[in-house]
Every structure is written in C-alpha cells, then in structure tokens.
Amino acid sequence: MKAGEIRTKTADELVTELEALKKEQFNLRFQRATGQIENTARMRQVRRDIARIHTIAAEKQRNEAKA
C-alpha cells in the first residue's frame, strides 16, 4: 500500500485497515513458527504498512490540532 492511498482514507478507514493488517501480521507469525509460511517478504510489507498508517494518522491528528 502506498502512502498516497493511505492519505486519501478517513480516520475510521485507517483504523479498520490497521486492524486487518495486525490480524494478518499475527497469522503470518504463526505460519512462520509452524513452518507453513510461503511468502516471507509479506511479513516485511505488512510491518511497513502498519508503520505507514501510524505515521499518516499522527500527521492527520497534528494537522487537525493546528486547525
């Protein structure tokens, strides 16, 4: 997911997306522990997407506080 896509979403959509990514991250960790994971790069993508969402959500909160 690109930062531009995330910026267009509302705060509620960001929360929903964040919950979905955290669930996926949890499932990927279990797959890795049991040796069932096929795409190990997906773990890195999910982790970075979570960080992007946190960063952009914080930016939006700062901008709202200024206004």
Image (cartoon, rainbow, N blue to C red):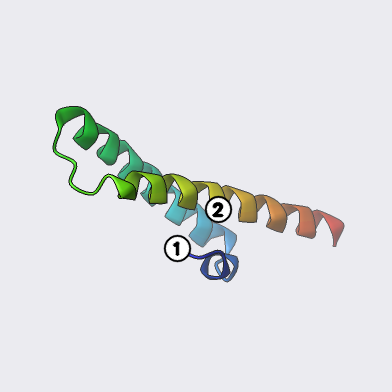
Q: Is residue 21 left or right of residue 30?
A: right
Above or below, 26 relative to 17:
above
Residue at screen point 58% across, 48% down: 54
Mark 2–mark 1 distance (CA, rounded to whole Å): 9 Å
Q: Can you say whether 1 is above or below 59 in the image?
A: below
Measured along the vertical axis of the image, is residue 62 above or below residue 29?
A: below
Left or right: where 40 falls relative to 8 = left
Image quadrant containing the N terminus: bottom left
Identify the mark at residue 1; answer none if there is no mark: 1
Q: Position of residue 17 (x, y in %)?
A: 44, 56
Q: Which residue is mark 2?
A: 52
Q: For mark 1, give the secondary structure.
A: loop
* Percent of width and height locating residue 26: 32, 37
The amino acid pointed to by label 1 is Met
Question: Where, by quadrant of the figure, is residue 36 drawn?
Answer: top left
Instruction: Please report the residue visible at 77 percent of the width from the left and 59 percent of the height from the top.
Output: 64
Q: Decide which of 11, 37 is in the foreground and name it.
A: 37
| Crowding at mark 1 (Cα within 10 Å: few <14, some 14-19, many 20+) | few
- Residue at image x 39%, y 45%? 44
At 18% from the left and 46% from the top, the residue drawn is 38
Residue 33 vertical placement versus 18 (above, below): above
Badge 2 density bin: few <14, some 14–19, many ≥20, Cα 10 Å: some
Amino acid carrying label 2: it is Arg
